[in-house]
Image: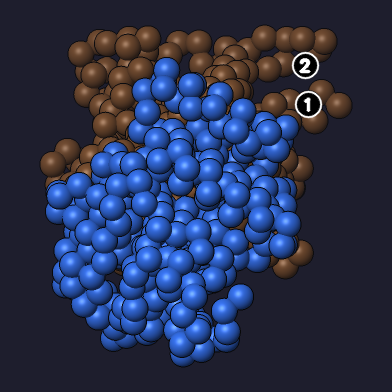
Amino acid sequence: MLRVEHLTARYGAVVALRGVSMHVDEGDLVAVVGPNGAGKSTLLNTVAGLLKPVNGKVLLDGTDVTGADPARLVRAGLALVPEHRRIFRDLTVGENLQVAGITASAADRRLRLDAARQRFPILDSRWDTAAGHLSGGEAQQLAIARALMSDPKLVLLDEPTLGLSPVMTDVVFDLLAELHERGRTVLLVEQNAHRALALADRGYVMRPGEIAAEGPGAELAARDDLFATYLGGGVG
Amino acid sequence: MSTFVQTIVDGLGRGSTYALLALGISVIFGVMHLVNFAHAELITVGAYLAYFLSTRDINWWVLAPAIVVSAVVASVATERIAFRWVRGSSPFTMLLTSFALERLSHALWQVFVSPTKKSFAGPAWVFDTFEVGGIRFEWMDVATIAVTALVLALTAFVFRRTLFGIAVRAASEDFDAARLMGARANRVIAGAFAFAGFLAGVAAALILMRSPSAEPALGSDYLIKAVVAAIIGGLGSFTGAVAGGLALGLAEVMLRGYLPEGVWERLTDAFVFALIAALFIVRPQGLFTVRSAERV
């Protein structure tokens, strides 16, 4: 579904990605883990169109979407849950979800809003609350619900458990597992490396700017050497 | 007492046009981080259109909507012709672009129409008055306040209840996040310019009914007041822009009314700006605090 070929991206003079190649097959949950500064978020931002690469290609269902505008990529079936959630704090929960359904017809948007209210009861109960008043866990659920409003083929999630309590981290991982079980294709960048790899069909371990290792998630999760070298400690 | 009430109504009438202009400036600032110094040129566009149409004996029931439409078209055109090319540039570049556009507008009117003022007839009823409880009011003040209230209610509806309005508010808060939701940058920004043009067009129609004349620098005085009103309210805050405009209008009219006639009266603007300076010492962020908008 998603194929990234020899992607190079930079912030000014700093090269953040150097010829990164990876792929995500339909229905898979793929985890990308690595130390801070490895380029994980840069990879997602480049795929989602927020950063134009200096070299390489991004193919979505075989179509070259390299450097395409984010709004076009949403219409092509890609949704990003960005790092730090970036919910619209001054908008209500309902308004956040409405604007996230901007690509849908009015009828589809209504159906998806109803579905979001049923799937996320906590959001339903706070529908008219300004999103800036939500707790971290509620805000993350809103960010994920928002991404689902465009009914994407591929969901990219950037550090969805960052700053969350252990209880809310469990809620988010349960949600990811549910998305996966329902057949949604997911590309997950996550600081909680072991847990992400254990959940994933496949995984990539990044070192600064490059892919250091790839393979089935469970296998990568069991490799002490990778954790010792790149992920700051032992398994578990 | 009657003078005080009359002054309040007069102040609200004057402040209403500032509020409409300041709101337009805030809408554009929200989505582009641009303080559009060419915004009040939309009044000049409307004024010249009204002048040309009035020479053909077209009445104000047609002139007023035509002024509004011309401001919308001109506003969208400035975005398409000038501001789209500098989108994403530094705020300084965008500011200079808006200054250039303002100067260019003055020059074009001077060269292709006339450097002198062109007057035309306003509606006959503008200076008519009526009396309630011994207090005399001008119909135009009441019409200005009523039209502004209607337009503000419409604005509130658009920004609270329509997908376009919600998308503009979202984009004002975090433009990249709005694009990640599928909002098309060009449409949101062009829509914001169209709406700002609509607000400026209504303000222009109200201004021109009272002062029916066109000259190249017509917009300049209103521009300063509108920008100041938007800053008083907290640049980017829609509610603040309205509050700032009304407060500025009230302050102006009250100072003019209560300062001694003669030299002091002419210092009204200086007093108003001194009050504004005092406000910024107490509240540097303006009356309303705004979360920082993302620039695109």
Q: Secondary structure at mark 2?
A: strand
Q: Colour of chain A?
A: blue
Report the quarter where the C terminus of chain A lies. Answer: bottom right
Type of amino acid under label 2: Ile
Using the numbered discs, state the Cα–Cα distance from disc 2 to disc 1 in whole angstroms. 8 Å
Asked if the residue at tag 1 contacts the one at tag 2, i.e. Cβ–Cβ closer than 8 Å, the answer is yes
Q: Is residue B55 above or below residue A217?
A: above
Residue B77 in picture, x, y percent from top left: 23, 40
Foreground residue among A185 and B38? A185
Q: Dot 2 falls on which chain?
A: B
Q: Indicate whether B126 appears above or below A236.
A: above
- Residue A122 in percent (x, y) is at 70, 38
**SS type, badge 1:** helix
Pointer 1 residue? B5
Is residue B1 in view?
Answer: yes
B195 to A58, vertically: above or below: above
B158 relative position to B291: left or right: left
Q: Which chain is brown?
A: B
Residue at image mark 2: B135
